[in-house]
Every structure is written in C-alpha cells, then in structure tokens.
Image (spheres, grey):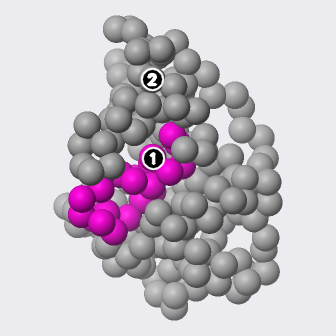
Amino acid sequence: AQGTNKMTYNDDWVMTWLGIGSQIDGLGHLGIDHRYYNGVHISDFWVADGLTKFGIDKLPPIVTRGVLLDIAGYRGQKMLEVGTAINRKDIEGAMKTQRVEIGKGDVVILNTGWQALATSDPVRFMSGQPGLGVEGAKFLATKDVVAVGADTWGVEVQPSEDSDLVFPVHQELLAKNGIYILE
C-alpha cells in the first residue's frame, strides 16, 4: 500500500493497438489497503487472468446526460496551472455561471484547458496537472453522479493536495462512492 491513505491498485492489461488515449477506470482499479468498492477485499475478486468483478468489462453502458463545466473559463483562464485543485467552490461557481445543475446519474466533465499541452508540450503535460480535489470529489458524490472526467491524463490534481496521499480522489470516487473515472 502506498501513502498514508494506503492506496492499492489493479490496472488493465491490453495486448492491442488502441489508437486513442482515453479510458474509464473501473471500480476494481484503485482501493484502500486492498479494499475496493463496498469494502470488498482484493482476494474476493482478483485472479491471475483478471478481475471476477469490478473490472471495466463489467461496466454497463452509460447512457445519460453529460455536464461539461468550464472550470478554466470560470476562473478567467485558458488553462489552469499544474497543481490547481478543483473543489466545491469552483464547481458551484461554474454551474452558476453556465446556468446548469448537476443531477443524479449525470456524467460530469471538467475543462481545465490542460489537454492543449498533450501535443504542444507533452513533457509539461505529463509533469503534473490541474484537477479534481478531494473536497470537490466528495461534493460530486453528494450529487449522485455516475462518472467524472476531465481533459487531463488522470482527472485528479497532481501533485496531490496532501503530499502524504497517493491518488486520494480516485479512492473517494471509485472505492468509497462507486463513481467511474473517465481519463
């Protein structure tokens, strides 16, 4: 387990050319001290050739409303800086500015402007990122969203708001609340 938050994880293994850079993190991707969604221990669903539950292959189709929140625009910027945490104040502010509400079952996508660096400055793009903070993740969980995504490589702020914690937003969304992450 890594960090004081005891982050543990499984990752997908694919032998193919994807041709794209997006993915969805399933509920078996990241846990807390070997416990995943609903407190299920890794020993109850991990086998050498995959996950018997919580794998991305178990994800049902997501057909729902999407809410794009322009966080960079709300802050008056084209692109947020690395390490900028998006929390409740930003989410509520962007919702008010855009005159949108987040409802149960929605998918929320956060625009940080960071994606512009993917081809123009890939080293900077991968050096860290602006992204969702723990308090923002907890707020979105109260809205009963089904998935959260962003125009970054890992959705949550990097470096982390607390240097002792490793991917705490992933833990909050996946393990604690069963909310998928779109990366």
The residue identified by callout 2 is 41
Q: CA distance from mark 2 to mark 1?
A: 14 Å
Q: Amino acid at mark 1?
A: Gln
Q: Nearer the viewer, mark 2 or mark 1?
A: 2
Q: Residue at horizontal 45%, vertical 46%? A: 171
Start and end of the magenta stretch? Answer: 154-175
Q: Is 135 rendered above or below residue 65?
A: below
Q: Residue at horizontal 47%, vertical 63%? A: 134
Q: Is 88 rendered above or below residue 147?
A: below
Q: Residue furthest top?
A: 48
Q: Amino acid at mark 2?
A: His
Q: How far across and down, in percent of the image, does residue 71 sit?
A: 55, 77
Q: Residues within 10 Å of mark 2 (few under 14, many from 20)?
A: some
Q: Residues within 10 Å of mark 1 (few under 14, many from 20)?
A: many
Query: In this view of the protein, can residue 182 be seen by the observer?
Result: no
Query: In this view of the protein, can residue 175 be seen by the observer?
Result: yes
Q: How far across and down, in percent of the image, does residue 55 sit?
A: 51, 23
Q: Secondary structure at mark 2?
A: loop
Q: Nearer the viewer, residue 171 or 16?
A: 171
Q: Residue at horizontal 42%, vertical 43%? A: 21
Figure quadrant of the N terminus? top left
Q: Nearer the viewer, residue 98 or 49?
A: 49
The image quarter in which residue 169 lies: bottom left
The residue identified by callout 1 is 171
Q: Residue furthest bottom?
A: 76
The image quarter in which residue 59 lies: top right
Is 96 placed left or right of 138 in the picture? right
Is 64 placed left or right of 69 in the picture? right
How many numbered circles does the render carry? 2
Q: Secondary structure at mark 1?
A: helix
Is 98 placed left or right of 78 in the picture? right
Q: Residue at horizontal 63%, vertical 71%? A: 69
